Image (spheres, rainbow, N blue to C red):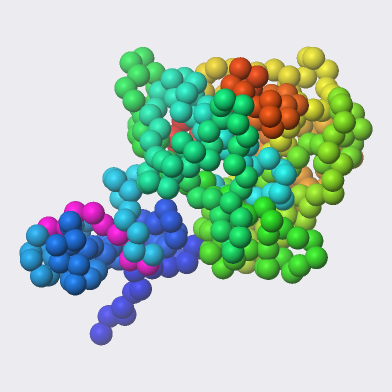
Amino acid sequence: MPETINPFGAPGDPMTRQRPYRCPYCFATFAMAGLRFSCDGGRHQDAGLFSSPLGRAHAPCPTCGVEAARPRCGRCHRYLPDRHLETPMLLIALAGPRNSGKTTYLAALFRRLDGVLADECGYAMTAADDYTRAALKETFHIGDGEPLAATRRGGGTHMQIVIRLERTPQPGRRFYARGRAKALTVVLFDAEGEDFDATRHHLDYFSQNELGHLAAADAVLFMVDTAAIPGARSAADGSLDSAATTSAEVVEQVTRFLRGPRRRRDDKIDVDAGLVLTKIDLARVDRGSMLRRPRPPVGYQANDRAAVHQELRARLREWEARQTERIIEHAYRDYQLFGVSALGNDLKRGEWHPERIHPYRVEDPLLWLLAKAGFLEG
């Protein structure tokens, strides 16, 4: 009798290639046979969840026979986003202690994604679900001098944003080159900053749900406050926050955990990593520095990316702060250094107004990952 294969698998499972789909919420991997359905319109809720007898993306209700066309994940039972089965997915995890600027960074990033970058790169951004739609409108709204909402706290909660990027026709551009994805689902997962406490065992930093999300990530962006780097702080303008942070511990703990489920034969972790220095505008550098030059408005440019990476390596050496970079460099399959500023200047919360906010290179990490994923030319 042939072996029965569970339609769900853990990240890194050798059978995953036979299950080409991933849920954007619980990250279970599955084949068509793993999809579940419910009677559309709820006319026969007592029918419960059912599967397609032919392993397709639709199935008839066993009670009334009406075709159900909205597939659900067979593990978490959430409805999958529209056209999700046709779209590759990129999962990005953000990791960093509280006050490292994750929430403010995401707010600035989404404003750029839905504005300047959409026109520049020729794509449309849409929210994949109601939670994301509400978060983009409420949590990440910057305007009228109102402060951003803090990262959601308590009970292992986290922020998980699911967006769909779809290329729009751009005559004369090469974005439709053969082999390039025309659409991409991007999931950004922000672990709860309060979970990072240096007095606890590294596995206690995360809930089981967060551990599963980290294990499934295609990339991890480690957020580090530039003001928390002693060398940069002493060379910065103004009075900087000298509160103790645990950015190095965060990198060490996440790396230690990922060495289990994502370790390759060459001992590298099969994940792309970015070390993102937030509030980079606070560090004093020469006017001719790459950290003062805006990104060329041509989408992703490999030469510009390489120049910024090398500049930051030199700065970290100057600040005697290369320990965290060395961990990432030796542990992950590929890594890059980024310098970003969500506000563009040292504004206090009451001063956050659209006219005073000038985000700097907040899109660089995502552009790099989109180019690696084949969505942008790179």
Q: Is residue 11 magenta?
A: no
Viewer-proximal residue among 276 and 148: 148
Q: Residue furthest bottom?
A: 1
346 displayed left or right of 37: right
> Which residues fall within the magenta stretch?
67-75
Q: Is residue 366 visible?
A: no
Q: Measured from the top left, where is residue 350 in percent x and y?
A: 68, 29
Residue shown at 19% from the left, 61% from the top: 42
Residue shown at 59% from the left, 42% from the top: 149
Vertical arrangement, residue 94 with respect to residue 286, above or below: below
187 displayed left or right of 365: left
Which secondary structure is most common in the magenta stretch?
loop
Tell me where residue 289 sits by quadrant. Answer: top right
Q: Measured from the top left, where is residue 187 in percent x and y?
A: 47, 46
Position of the N terminus, as image quadrant, is bottom left
Tell me where residue 134 sits by quadrant. Answer: top left
Q: Measured from the top left, where is residue 351 in percent x and y?
A: 69, 25
Viewer-proximal residue among 108 and 148: 148
Q: Measured from the top left, where is residue 359 in percent x and y?
A: 63, 25
Residue shown at 79% from the left, 52% from the top: 246
